[in-house]
Amino acid sequence: MTIAPRTPRPTLATPLSSQSGQTRPRPTQTFGFLLLEHFTLMSLASVIEPLRMANQLSGRELYRWFTLSHDGEQVLASDGLRVMPDAGLQTPLSLDTVIVCGGVGPQRTVKREHIGWLQGQARQSRRLGAVCTGSWALAKAGLLDGYETSTHWECMAALQESYPRVALSTRLFSIDRDRATSSGGTAPLDMMLHLIAMDHGRELSAGISEMFIYDRARSDQDLQRVPLKHVLGTTQPKLLEIVALMEANLEEPIALDELASYVDVSRRQLERLFQKYLHCSPSRYYLKLRLTRARQLLKQTAMSIIEVASACGFVSTPHFSKCYREYFGLPPRDERLGIGSRQARQAVTAQPEGPSAPLPDATLAQEPVSSAVLALTQAQGEPTYASVPL
């Protein structure tokens, strides 16, 4: 399986500013959520709820959204609940962003109508995205070729085999030019918080996290844990056993010769296995496991940097800091302080300013009312309404 490099890519736009340095209000952005059959409700809620709360906290309709199905009829979620969408694909809508919400069995649920519609949206320069396994639909439509892409780990091997031009990443979410893709579960929430921060500032994003009692919003540098058996299958039991030994011995790393002897292979065979199936040396893979564990400890515990270094098998703090900076792009101290990742410090590409071109009156007349309007009206009685000035 090909894993995308850590080279920073251009991200989405920062808040628009005038020459005087004052932030200018953005036009309302409209999201369309395309629901595939057997989509996961958790992922759908994780992308819509941050938009609702952004409106509530700002006291303005920053975002509106519509749910869509291929025929406008109800869609069965993975938990058996039926959701009635706002519109079908034939309904004319003025959308800025389209996000495909996938779930169970995307290979079977992506229809020809989905593909044609998504390709049409791409021709209209819509920003496209996906959550959970929704990336399958975009990949099948040829809209992820050459794009760094995240999807649920259970779908990664099949997606890579079927669409080798997609640059799959193990990150929780990936934002690459006009594509925004996320793995499943709560990862879409992290992606949306990131997008909202890029649109309207970190204060609003932090306020949303607080409302959802979401202690730590993860960044696009955080990885989803992909069980190795889903990468290798059952064809390499010795390699799986070696990796399990590595994972169980991070504080006191085992020498490579010892690891080889445990599973009855030579050191040379061990190195061949790692190069062939994991595309790196055994020592490099072992170092990655230790550094990933160190990152978790830095972000989730109060352990000192010296204690973290020791817990992850580094004999000195300077050596730990050097390895950490080389791998993650920032020193452990900055990680602990939350100063930001290498990618967060890159210049971002601004989107075109100003509202979208107005649609013909006939199109506007047919457009359904977004549930964002109702939600914002109901939120006016909440104490948090307009609590974050923009």
Image (tube, rainbow, N blue to C red):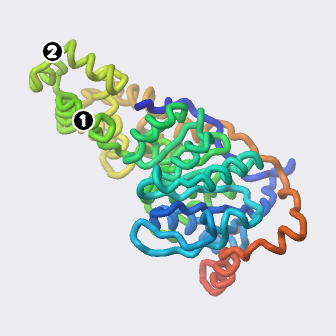
Task: Report helix, strand or loop for mark 2.
Answer: loop
Q: Please identify the quarter of the rendering in which residue 304 is found.
A: top left
Residue 330 appears anywhere in the view = yes
Q: Position of residue 345 (x, y in %)?
A: 61, 38
The residue furthest front is 112
Is residue 86 depicted above or below 111 in this figure?
A: below
Please give the name of the residue rendered at 77% of the width and 62% of the height, measured from the top-left corner. 94
Task: Report the residue marked by disc 1.
Answer: 310
Going by the numbered disc 2, the residue's amino acid type is: Ser
Towards the viewer: 71 or 139: 71
The residue furthest top is 268
Q: Position of residue 52 (x, y in %)?
A: 61, 71
Please give the name of the residue rendered at 49% of the width and 56% of the height, measured from the top-left corner. 109
Q: Position of residue 139 (x, y in %)?
A: 56, 42
Task: Report the residue marked by disc 2.
Answer: 266
Q: Earlier in the sequence, mark 2 or mark 1?
A: 2
**Pointers 2 and 1 in contact (C-beta within 8 Å):** no
Towards the viewer: 125 or 178: 125
Please give the name of the residue rendered at 52% of the width and 71% of the height, measured from the top-left corner. 211
Q: Is residue 27 left or right of residue 335?
A: right
